[in-house]
Amino acid sequence: MDKFLSTGEGLKRFLKSGNSRFLTTLCLTALMTIGGLKQLKANTVNSGAGISRPKEAAGQALDAVQGLIHRLLPGKERNFELVWLDKGAINGLDSFYLGSKGKKVVIKGSSQLALAKALNTYLEQFCHTRISWYAADSIWLPEELPVVNKPVSQTCRFEKRFFLNYCTFGYTTLWWQWKDWERLIDWMALSGINMPLAITGQEYIWQKVWEQFGMTAGQTRAFFTGPEHLPWQRMGNLDRWQGPLPQEYIDGQFELQKRILKRERAFGMTPILPAFAGHVPYDLKKLYPDIKISNLGSYDTGPENDAYFLDPMDSLFISIQKAYLSLQNQLLGTDHYYGADPFNEMTPPSLEPDYLANVSRTIYKGMQDVDTAAVWVQMGWTFYYQRKDWTNPRLEAMIKAVPQGKMLLLDYFCERTEVWKLTDGYFNAPYIWCYLGNFGGNTQMAAPLQKVAKLLPVTEADPNRRHMIGLGSTLEGFGVNEFMYEWLFDYGWNPAVSDAKNWIKDYADSRVGHKDPVLESAWEKLLAIIYNDQVSGVGLGNIVQSQPMLKGHGYYSGLSNYDYNQMATILPVFLMADSVSKKKPGYLRDLAVLEKQVLVNLAVSFRDTIAKAYYAKDSVSFNRYTHLFLGLCDDLDQVTGTQSELLLGKWIQDARAFGTTPDQKNYYEKCARILITTWGGETKNIVEYAAKDWNGLISSYYKKRWQLYFDFLRKTLATGAAPDQQAFDTQRQHFDWNWVNTHAPKQEFMVEPLSNPLEICEKVYRKWALYLN
């Protein structure tokens, strides 16, 4: 067998023996580990700087990977030798080999991303360290880089690896500058992601396009929402809310987009750029009175913010599409993938299959007229969310109106519902299996690792899966469960990680730089309790974040359904980690997040005890437990204050940095506050959708709302009557809106994390341990 695989002819014959991807992967792995790499030696030359390059490749082909090493591991560049593998020799699949030559780590890959993924594998498996997607997070490395004592080779089984969601550009990256994007792109490269959504700065192009059709710059700025709601305007859900959009923001985001695209393309990624899906300014009607437009609503922000959809049969439709794509391609170039979602969470003007087919046909024709290689990428969220409307005949008509292979669907929320199974594999169109995992950037510990680890292998093995050409994530925000996304993209290269129990133990070691049996045991318990089937649903929150009430928890503060008492028993185990582990930033972050979750879970029992005391007219118990509840909020604020990712002050500081005058800074701060609290206006309904356990947000917002409620209840405590919840909600809404309109000069928040997280977590645990038993 070894001899057979070591020859090119043998490889070809073996591949022809079956079309299974498993056979391909097995064969390629054997080729790389048995000696087939020797055949590739003649195709590489040494650059003299630790890099071997293919003779035919451009000199800058591997500069991106070298730059990655320099940024993340400064001073360690010469510890690595990078070798480019001819992709054709390994059947066109991204593959890498990881080994050592003396003290030097040898990384061989078929692409920049394969090399980056190999580097990440080395860091995780041999250095026991992980690199976060946050620029503020430090990187721990052993003093001496270890050798690769057992070579590793992997082949990615998925052509496409998708990442991001329109909403992520609001709930997470809204205030990011280049340093933040640079780290995220590095993280994506380390994860082997090759298809990121890239929608930053498109308003610059749209402004120029709308001017071509007769609108003024002022009119276009008034059409745009504030920066915090641009993701939803881009999806056609609303207009104008919190606008006009400042011109300096429009210009600055366009410059940022150019840097983002340049770096993503340097890694060999194919970014998905936006296209026209039919959403137009209402002012266009004044310039073209005969055009037919339909009102699609405004996400409950008021009729003045309603969005409008242009009938695809109107001759203006294709003209706008061509104008936008022509200018975008001229200014930003293209990778031939375009995102367009005409009816995201909206009811189309007609649900007749013929109408939907015409919409589809027209959108794609406009793309194709500008770019003959265009592929339309469409979210599958609406086909899950409004499945009742999107029957198979309607969806099939929309998909089949586009040439075969020219519409790529994102199966958006597969951990909940695999729509491909309901639609015969999207009627034979290519699609990507996606894990969503987070709504609104919520910060609850919840990720269905064990469930997804079962779903994906079953999908891969299903003969009816049709054209599943990739996997990806459509997360709305980053939240606190980063490991789940690391696992997902690991799975694309290594099917063995479907053994979630083994993977989680390796993950535990990589958080602290060495093997710590105590933490391995703790993570294994977490896996069984909360990382089993905890699908992160819409508005997954906690009692502290919820609208104050004695029963229930509000629409957007759904509670996790795992056993809170069992989870609380894991916290003291975490605190028993060894002294080496306790010095690592990964451990300190995980400890703070776990303790935060245990405390917000405890708040449920406090609230329920307060309710019993109220109805029993027991003022002693009522006062005791309301005091405990508010004290718990104070300690939650302290624990979250130890982590940079959980600081309201940083979110506000980053927002204010976009302004140059006090008025501008205050404007951006209001945008930052509104998105994570009321979302809409004072009396609207999307409150708490993006709730977060953040230092500063807990003390100034959540705690004070509960304090108001407890004071409100005291007025009728002696009677034990049902409180007038509607009257309080009006008071609470007024408080919420006043908070949104408060500015940092009047109320300062921490912008740097507290320096003693272990001491704080141990002290807080000792204080509440009695109530956790």
Image (tube, rainbow, N blue to C red):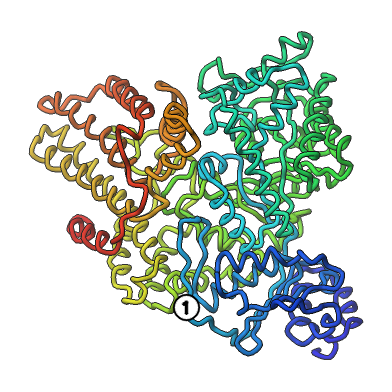
Residue 239, compared with residue 117, is above or below; it is: above
Q: Secondary structure at mark 1?
A: loop
Picture coordinates of residue 213, whole percent (x, y): 77, 19
Q: Which residue is depicted at the point 46% across and 56% down?
A: 136
Q: Where is 561 relative to 583, above or below?
A: above
Instruction: Classify residue 263 as left or right of residue 666.
Output: right
Quadrant position of residue 14? bottom right
Question: Is 87 situated above or below 615?
Answer: below
Nearest the viewer among 188 and 235 is 188
Q: Residue at label 1? A: 142
Would residue 323 be found to the left or right of residue 615 on screen?
right
Depth check: give the residue in front, 394 or 160.
160
Residue 91 quadrant: bottom right
Provide residue 618's location: percent of width, then percent of height: 10, 36
Residue 675 point in image, percent of width and height: 46, 34
Q: Is residue 325 visible?
A: yes
Q: Would residue 679 be seen by someone viewing this image from the given angle?
A: no
**For the residue marked with disc 1, what is the amino acid?**
Pro
Classify residue 772 as left or right of residue 416.
left
Which residue: 82% across, 20% down? 316
Query: What x and y, as percent, mark residue 369?
Result: 89, 35
Total residue callouts: 1
